[in-house]
Structure formats: structure tokens, C-alpha cells
Image (spheres, coloured by chain):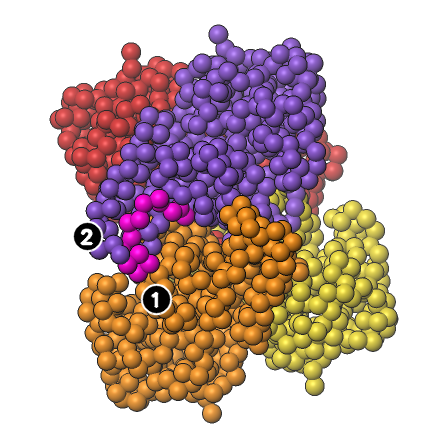
Chain colours: A orange, B purple, C yellow, D red
Amino acid sequence: MKKKVAIVGASGYSGEELLRLLLAHPLAELTAVTSRQYAGQTVAQVFPRFSLYPGAKVLRFSEPNADLLAKQAEVVFLALPHGVAAQYAVPLLQLGCQVIDLSADFRLKNDALYREFYGHDHPAPDLLKKSVYGLPEIYRAQIRNASLVASPGCYPTSILLPTVPLLREGLIKPTGIIADSLSGVSGAGRKAELDYLFVECNESVRPYAVPKHRHLSEIEQELSLAAATVVTIQFTPHLIPVNRGILTTLYLAPVQHFESGTEVPAASSTDAATTLAALSEKIAACYHAAYGNEPFVRLLDPARSELPDTKNVAGTNVIEIAWRLDPRTGRLIVMSAEDNIIKGASGQAVQCFNVMCGFSETAGLV
Amino acid sequence: MKKKVAIVGASGYSGEELLRLLLAHPLAELTAVTSRQYAGQTVAQVFPRFSLYPGAKVLRFSEPNADLLAKQAEVVFLALPHGVAAQYAVPLLQLGCQVIDLSADFRLKNDALYREFYGHDHPAPDLLKKSVYGLPEIYRAQIRNASLVASPGCYPTSILLPTVPLLREGLIKPTGIIADSLSGVSGAGRKAELDYLFVECNESVRPYAVPKHRHLSEIEQELSLAAATVVTIQFTPHLIPVNRGILTTLYLAPVQHFESGTEVPAASSTDAATTLAALSEKIAACYHAAYGNEPFVRLLDPARSELPDTKNVAGTNVIEIAWRLDPRTGRLIVMSAEDNIIKGASGQAVQCFNVMCGFSETAGLV
Amino acid sequence: MKKKVAIVGASGYSGEELLRLLLAHPLAELTAVTSRQYAGQTVAQVFPRFSLYPGAKVLRFSEPNADLLAKQAEVVFLALPHGVAAQYAVPLLQLGCQVIDLSADFRLKNDALYREFYGHDHPAPDLLKKSVYGLPEIYRAQIRNASLVASPGCYPTSILLPTVPLLREGLIKPTGIIADSLSGVSGAGRKAELDYLFVECNESVRPYAVPKHRHLSEIEQELSLAAATVVTIQFTPHLIPVNRGILTTLYLAPVQHFESGTEVPAASSTDAATTLAALSEKIAACYHAAYGNEPFVRLLDPARSELPDTKNVAGTNVIEIAWRLDPRTGRLIVMSAEDNIIKGASGQAVQCFNVMCGFSETAGLV
Amino acid sequence: MKKKVAIVGASGYSGEELLRLLLAHPLAELTAVTSRQYAGQTVAQVFPRFSLYPGAKVLRFSEPNADLLAKQAEVVFLALPHGVAAQYAVPLLQLGCQVIDLSADFRLKNDALYREFYGHDHPAPDLLKKSVYGLPEIYRAQIRNASLVASPGCYPTSILLPTVPLLREGLIKPTGIIADSLSGVSGAGRKAELDYLFVECNESVRPYAVPKHRHLSEIEQELSLAAATVVTIQFTPHLIPVNRGILTTLYLAPVQHFESGTEVPAASSTDAATTLAALSEKIAACYHAAYGNEPFVRLLDPARSELPDTKNVAGTNVIEIAWRLDPRTGRLIVMSAEDNIIKGASGQAVQCFNVMCGFSETAGLV
């Protein structure tokens, strides 16, 4: 009844969270977990905080070995650095496993784009067409039958879920999109680098990778598919002193003019108010149609003046979305908050796993 | 030789920092400091951390009284809530004092605008024309002869200094400006409200006052003056878990096209590169001309890939500015970092004081 | 099959966490939750982060009413301020409910002691003898049959669990005990006071309530029972800038001398080493006997040089305990870490609930 | 008139702060600053936040060279790792420089003790007798004439200043002393290690190096000198999530009994109160005599119920001290707070420099 699963590479923040989620998953049996660094130790020894979970005291980390993994597990999660994941995906797929990859290795459809953003040739370009981008709210049907799922990055999730329905419905222009994102430090991974020391991050806020962050490639790929035209966006990530969470603020241009400002002098203020009300209804309807029944998307209530806050999603697989139309500028501001390690990584991977297995999508995630 | 100064209202974060700066100022003699709450206590008793400064053990807080203050001080700093400051400014000016007001009471030139954003009639509209907006890098000459200086807010400073020179030079369009700002919690003031409790702010990031924050009024007033046309901007403030600092990311549209993207297909990529290089030079020259000799503006070196970080300005009166042209989108991204309580409030007020008195502008600020 | 439960007062940090635990509890049916402030709103509206739990969208906060509660629930949790809890406990018990009180109202056995530490007469002194101190690891048998459980405070839990077994076994002296504790800010409650503002707590560490904190009364009561003699301890709480967690360091005097230092010159160093080894075995055996099978006590492994860390217990009902004998001073240092809101409050209350109902003790807590 | 000074090794947190203090010092001329890593770059390039200080844009980091340094500076500060400092101190002293060493290399008087605690032979044992322990409040006279000053560690300063006067006066027993200390993360240095990453320190509190931290050696050496007998103490350091600050809580035993508790049943409660009052006066008098005129020791006022808080000393060279007698236990609790990088390292070194040069002791430190 339970699905046998394995994790390759579980020493980083995403791998650790994935381990926790799968140990607690009612329909998954974690049969193998690999880590060169921890091989031989039990899960409870390496992560004492997981010792209450059944199995944590007996399951031992092992050296990664595709042949062995294929015998132990039906579904294998890869929580490895970019470039390394492909080395395991290829043999595991050949041996009949389903693979859910948390790295960026299989997110792009185009190997030239991969080369541009990652600086080297893709190690297994044939698999790019086979892989499914693991955003269940967008690609549920494809994930259901996928053998290889590329679980999206944390920034892309926070940008795509608020934007894709609007683009698909043609409510916003595909040009001029700006995404300003604030990420907790766990997003940088468990790496011993000076930049991520406590003293360097605490009481500090800073942009980085301006203006061309690697995640732009998958964001623009998916936005282009949604808009059915090439989309180029502006994306500015910032590092802020929290452990968990991404807050993204999106600046979007509605197709319909509603502003009463000086830039569109022709519209009378009554007309503008009417147009604004009509547009508000369309946007609310669009989001409701897209996410009204989604368990992990929380549409905040404008009537209650709610805005997203990372503390309301930390530790959960939920993304919060709120929006405001600005009658002064004619812009649509959309804001989202998610836990970068859960909905932005491991929780999403488990959600994909649930879809692939035909389980309830919230299994192990509430 | 020393200028006699007083502070009205010194129990908030800005007032406390102003107190520290004036206690340490080599050319100021702090003769009075008022606070209803602390009247009768010495400065050292209320703020033990200032006890090393000469005078902190003898100077006592008193009840605010304009007549008395006018006898004790030549220059009076008002660190009071919006609306209250005007009540002291009027009599103090009549009694011959110079006034530096840290509230929003005298920042706007137009009392209708004040009513729109602050919700009530301005208490002393005649003074609006007399007051000078206290940004020394922009209004140094006017501040020199001012009797009433309205020290700018923290968000406006972080937005105006990076933007005004570009607008004045006509390098960017006055339309479509977006300012995305991240502020430390001291910006909310020393107020006993649930929203600002440690547990509510720590491990939290959130936007607020979307889309119409009060500070928009003074920001747009000053941008409009710089552009010589009405400017309406998009401004989104966020609260982040640091004590001090504002990081602002500005999205601007250069007048000159330089992008090689699909949106401007006519430009060949060689032409685009040439245009980009030329535009880069113009922007660098514009900033160098505006701020090359400014002691408190640090233009970060693109050659060293430097980006602003609030920890590099916390505790100082410096604003850091960096910029990037994005050849993919054609946008100019400008980023600034400042200490919201110093360059965004009290340090700037002291800088204005130095200008008004003909002192070296860095006196008491290094 | 499920037990019907209610929560009175769920707007503070402990009440909110209790709400989360009971919403997710597989054997509890939360039928009522009261709050004057939130009456009429659903749980999902007040705490959006709980909206995924079944029932959160339909269960509404109501005004507290003992008669009604007694009809709705078999077990009622009181998450109310000290002094207020007793007002509900008395009628609820009379109406046949079992009561688990998270306040300090029923923790002391002696109403004179209550008066000394809480400053007023106890409102229901007759109940003091009836109530059971809700530390399952110490009072499991009594909790099983209790109608009124007084769930212990966060500091007491962190001090009693490491100390009681040693006192019961006579391994340490009942005199001279020192407990130095560090608490996260949620311990102060969700109160709008200046002292607990983000800016006042961040980058701050401070002792408070020195030398006589209220929790001393219940700590000393329980230590005295364990030692079968009157025990007076030194206790210093400190506030540190984390949301969750208590770290306690205990300084204890073993009955047996083992130090090779100058204070006990008679012992040769060989003898001292032998004695130390023997004592180490006794302490290890004592803790193993007391807690070896306890699901929520994690005895850290000295062979792995492990020491407690609040981040390893945050979000769980686990307390970590480690100890070291110091051959230089002859002292036993015991250190514990727990989540102050879970094992130090709400989780412990749910653990008691499980014991009272005959459920698996970990139900709803893993 | 100005003293020529140099810093060897300025890339760590203490070195950086020392650089700032000496750049701003009115009576010091910083002529050289060395760093292998930064050689060739200006101070302003490496530390942009210092660019406002005169000299920061022209002074360049150089490779360390004792001969050259001896020509450039009269006083040389060593901010180097333990063990490395001695390699520079020996030639610099021979070449006639005065040396202020911030490492542990010259703090101990006894090379056997050094070997026990640091694990290797001392590289220059002859200098141990020559060096002066740089606590100005204790060794001012000796520092005045010293050629080699060993600036104390951060933990020792926080423990010694509150304790030495009491031991010298014979008010407390030299036995049974316990020091429980909480340190900010900068105390661990600017080292790229996983343990000090933001995510590992934030929302974490943990003891470490229990029970034998290296600093015990210098603490016990100095306490033994003050008590004129061998003193062995208990010391437990903890890491807490702040950048700056050490909070130490000391548990001390007054020579005189004053408690009314059960442990000393002979004393009537009236006698106990009288004794407590008398002892309080003695302790207050002792501290007043020792530190009443010290600029950098702030004795908190018991009448105002003040307790130390690291935020009140962060960024300053001040140590705060408060104390309480506990009539329940007979103990004296003394608490101190300091900035670990300033009074605990660089500020103290500058204070020693001022003493050595005959300058006002607060020069460059207010």
C-alpha cells in the first residue's frame, strides 16, 4: 500500500526538510537515504530532532548507488547540487524508477538556455523533453503520468503561481513584468561561506545577482508558455535575515486601463472607478477559478485588508497571494509569501509525489 | 562659538538618536531637552548608554514650553508626532528661533495635498511656503538661509537621492517609476503595538500600506520638481526584521533605448552594446557630478561588483547607491541603503543644522 | 471514539499553539474555542495559517460560557491569565468536565505560598489538593485519574525534568542548586508592552526578575517533594532574542566527591578518576532508568559530545538533556533545551490529555 | 603630538573594530595596517563603511613586515590568531616598539598553564613575565610603563571586573564561584564554519566548550592573584543570536551569612535583615571605591531596579555591572554586560594605549 521511496543527498536544508516530510508521510516508506558525509550513521544520529519519527533510529545513511537504490525504491528524490542530479537521474530512470529532482537540472526545456544560464552543456539533453515541471497547480495532469519531475525553485514558485493565471487569461500584459523578491538565508544552502555567517546576515539586507539571476531562465520559460509569447522579466532577489521564507512583490500592467491619473487624462474619474471595479472582479474571478479549490494556495481576503506575511506560511506548504489595483498608477500589485524550503522545494516535491501516486494531494503535508 | 540647541520630544527612536548626536556634536551646546514622560530626570538616567557624554549627567528633561525654549536655544529640533510639531514651530519661529522639524508637518508645499494624505487641515498653512525641504544634497543653498527646515522622511531620502539627479538630467523617464523599499522595525517608532512585538516581526517579512503610503506625497512632490512635470510613482514598503536600515530598489526607464531584447527588435546587438556603454557613461557622469564630492553619499564601484548592504551604513549618516543597466529589459535598476534613523531622520537633521550654521557639514557626524 | 475538547482563551501564544495541536490531533474533536476578542470569527479567519486543518473554516470563536462549554466538551483546556483560570475551573469541574489548566492557578499545593508569590488570596483553595501537577514523566499515574491537571510552566519543566531523578536517587545534594535559564520572547506572552518590541529585544540579552521569579514557588515545591526535604534554589531567567525555546544550565553538587582539585586535596588523582568514572555510570544509569523509554525526553550522547540546542527542539514536544561532570570543580553541570510553548506549555498539556484519556502519549504530538 | 600606530592583521571582527577606533582617534596616527589577504587595497576599499574617516582612502593594507613596521610606528597592535602574535611581538619589541597584543599569547604568566590550555609550548616564554595584563581598571599603573600589553579576552573582562574588587576586599569566598556567560556570534570570529552560519545560529541558543573553555586559564590566574589563593571556577559559555555583546551572570558566596532560609536556622529574621543591610552597604562601598571614578564602568542603580542589557553597551567601551543579594539563598548575584568586540577586545586595547601614552583614557572612545 505504501510507496517505497529514497532520498539521494540529504545533508542540505532542502534534503533535511524532505527527510522530515517523508519520515512523517502516511503513505510513503522511506527505504534508503544517501549521503557520502553521513554514510553509516542513523537518521536520528545525524538529525536528532527527527528521532521521534518511526524508522529514524534504524534507517542508516548509505553511499549513493543507483543500482541499489532502484532495488530499494519505486520513487527516488534527488536533493543534489545542480549538475550532479543528472548523473543519478539517467540510470535510475533506465532502471525503472520514477525520479523527482529538486535541482535545476531538468527544469528547462531547451539545452541552449541551460548552457546560457548554467555555463556548461547539459549532461542529458534528451531527458529535457521528458521531464515535467513540478508545479502541481499548473501541471497536475502531466505530473500524474511523469517518470521524471523537475521540482521548481523557490523564487520561480513565488513568481509563477501569482502570475500564470493572469497571463493565461490575458488580464495582464506579458511585457514589463517586475518581480522583487526577499529570501531567507536558508535559500543559500548549508554552505560554509563568509557571506552567510550570522554576523554578516543579521542586521543586514542586500540585493544580489542583479540583474541576471539563474532562476530567470525557468521563470521566463514558464511565463512564456502561459502568455504564448516570449516573456522577459525584471527580477531582483534580496537576502534578508530570516531562516525561512520568500516574499515576492510583483508589478504588473493590466491590459485594461482603469487609472484616473494624469497619464491617461481622457478617462473621467467616474469611468475610471467603474473600470477599476470591473477589473477587480475579473482578477478576483481569475484567481478564484485557478486556485479556489487548491489546498496549498491561500487567496487573502481584500475585504479584510490582508497582506502576505512569511510567518503565516513558514513550516507549511502554503503560498499566500494578495493583490491590489492602484488607481493612481494603473498597476496591479500582486504579493506572495511561501516557505522557500517547503512550497519552494521539499513540500512541493512531496506534493508532486502525491500526484504521481494518486494519493490525496495533502497527504503528509498538513 | 557653540550654537545653543534644544530638542522637543526625545523619547522615540529618532529623538533618542538626535540626542546622542547633539550630545557629541563639537559645535552644539544642548541646553534643553523636553519630554512630558521623563520631565525631571537626567539624560543619563533615562538613557544610561549616553552617560559618558559630557552633560548627560546634569542636563534634565523638562516639560515643553516654547517661551522658555526660545530663551535657552537658538536652534530647536522638533522630534514630535505629525500634527503636534506645528504647535511648537509657530511660536518658536515667532520668538526668533530657527526650527528643524523631523515630522511631516512642513514637508509639503500644498495644504490640499497635506489634507489628502494626512486626513485633516494643515494647522499652519502659511508656513508651508517658508519651510525648506531638508535634503542638503539637493537644497543646500536654501537650507543655508532657512528659518524652518522640514527634515525628510526615511523612505523619501532613500528614493529621492538616487532619482533626482537622473530626472534633472533627463536621463530617465518621469513615468513608470517603481520604488520597492525594505525598512527596519525602528521605522515604526517606539510604540507599544502588537504588530511590532519581537515575536511578530522576527522570522517575518511583510508588505504594508499598499498601494498608498503617506510618504508618497513628499516623494512625488520632490520628483515632480526635479522632472519639471507631475510625477506619480509606485511605492511598496515592506517591514523586515532588522533594527536599523532601509534598502530601496528602484526600477527606472532610461530615455535612451539600449536593450537587445525582443521588445526592441530594430536595434542590432552591436548597436545595443554601444548604446549601453554610452548610457553607462552618462549615468556614471551624472551621479559623479551630483555626488562625487558629497561626504554622505557613497557611490558604489561597479568595477568591484559592489551592491548596497544596510549593515555598511547602519550607525552612519551615509547613503550607499549602486546601479545596473539590464540589457535584457532596457531598465535601469538603482539600489540604495541608509540608516533610517540617521540619514533617514536625525543625522540628516544635524547635517541641515551644520549647513544652517555654516559649520563643516560633517561636524558631529563622523 | 474521539474525545470532545474545548479551549477557553486562545489568543495568546500558548493558546494559539494549543489550538494548532488540537486541530491536528487524531483523537480529539475540538468543539468549542472561546475568545472575547475574536467571538464570531472562524479559526481560519483569526489564524489563517491553520486554515488547512479540517474544521478551521467552520469552527467559530465564541464568548466563554461554562454551562455551554460543559455541554460541548468532555475535556476543557484553560489558556487564560493567572487568576482568571480559576473562575472557569470551578464551575466546569462541578459540571463534570475534566480540566487542564495552563495557568499557574492550580500548580501550588499551599495557598500561603500562592499568596506569597502571586500577591493575593487563592480564589479556590480547596481545589489545590485535588489538582495534579501535569508533568507526565513524573506524575503519570496521578494524571491518569485526574479531573484537574495544572500544566507546569516553561521554566519549571526545563529545571524539574533534569533534576528530579537525581534528587530522588540521592545523587546530588538538595542544597546549593542553581538554575540559569534563557528564554525566547514568546514566554512573555502576546502583550503590547515596550519591553517586548522587536527593537528592544533584538540585539539585546538581559536578566530579569532577579532574584525572586514567581515560578520559583512551583519549582521549589516539586524539588522539595523529590528530595523529601525543603529545597531552596537560585534561579536567574534571561530574555534572549529568539521566538521559541528555553535553554537551562543547572549547577549541581554530587553527593560523592570526585574532583582532583585543590579543594579536596586528600584524594589522589587516580582515586579521583576512579570515583568520577563510577559517578558517571550512576548518573547515566539514573537518567536511563528515568527517561530511557520516555518519548519526549532526549538524553544526549556524551560519546558524541552532544550539547542541547533550542533549534533542535523548537516546534516539538521534546526536551533535550545533557550533562558533564567537571573534575576541576567537583560539580555536575546539566543542560536542557525545550520549546517553551510546546513542552513548556501546550504540548505538555496535550501530553497530559493523552494520559488522561488512555491514548498513546505521542498522539497528535509527532 | 600624535602617536604613530600600526595594526597587524585587521581582517577579523576585532581587527576591523580596532581599525575604526584608531582611524577616529584624535591622538593616534595610523601609519600602517597589514593583511596578507588585502595587501594593496585601501582601507576604504576593503571596509567601505570607514571611508568617511580621514586617511581611509589613502592608507593601504600591506604585507606584514616587522622591520618596516618598526620604522612606521611607535605602538603596534597585534590582532592575530593565538600562536601567530608571538612571532611579531618578539622582533617588534627588540626593535623598540611598544606592543599591544589582542591574542591570548601573552596573557598567562606561566608557560605550563599555557601548554595545558593551548596544547603546545609557548613560543616566547621569556616574555610572559614582561607582559602586563591589559585591564586598566586593575593594572593601570603597570600598563603605564609596559612595553608589552596582553589585552584580555572578552569573557575574562566580563567576569574579572565584577569579581576582582570583591575578592580583594575579602567580601566573597574564593571558592564555588560560577560564571554563566552568553556571547554574541562575533565572538567566534569571522570564520567560514557551518556552526556559525546564520541559519544555524538564528533561533538557536546553545552552551559550548563545557566544562573547560580556554579562557578559564587567564580568568583563574587573575582571580587567584586578587584572592591571594588558588581559585578554580565554573564557567559555562553559551552562544546566542546577537552580533555583539556578552552578558555574564555570576553566582558568588559572601563571606558573611545574611540569609534567613532554612540552611542557616540560627539567624533570626531580624538579624538576617540587619546583616543583609550591612552587607549591601559593604558591597556598594566596595564597588564605588573600585569603579566610582572609572569612565568605562557603569554601576547600575539598585534603587532604579536597573539590570544590565547588552543593547545598552553595544558599540561602546562600557561595562555595566549590577548586583543583588538573595535573602533566600544567601548568595550574591552579580551581572555584567559589555560589547565583546569593544570593551572585550579592541576598545580595551585602545584604552590601554591611552594609558601607555599618558593620554586621557577616554580619548577616541566616546
Q: Would you say C62 lies left or right of A39 here?
A: right
Residue B284 location, x and y as percent?
A: 29, 37
Main secondary structure of the magenta stretch: loop
Q: Is residue D98 visible?
A: no
Q: Label 1: few (<14), some or many (≥20) within 10 Å?
A: some
Circle 2: element type: helix
Q: Amino acid at mark 1?
A: Val
Q: Would you say B366 lies left or right of A115 here?
A: right
Residue D50 location, x and y as percent?
A: 34, 31
Residue A38 location, x and y as percent?
A: 31, 70
Q: Estimate the spatial distance between the alpha carbons at disc 2 and disc 1, rounded to whole Å.
A: 22 Å
Query: Which residue is denoted by mark 1 in the rendering?
Result: A230
Q: Would you say C127 lies left or right of C257 here?
A: right
Residue drawn at x 22%, y 66% as measured from the top left? A115
What span is colored magenta in the figure? B251-265
Q: Is residue C338 magenta?
A: no
Chain bearing tag 1 is A
Residue drawn at x 79%, y 49% as measured from the top left? C115
Q: Quadrant of residue A9?
A: bottom left
Q: Residue furthest left?
A: D67
Q: How many marks?
A: 2
Residue D123 location, x and y as percent?
A: 19, 38
Q: Amino acid at mark 2?
A: Thr
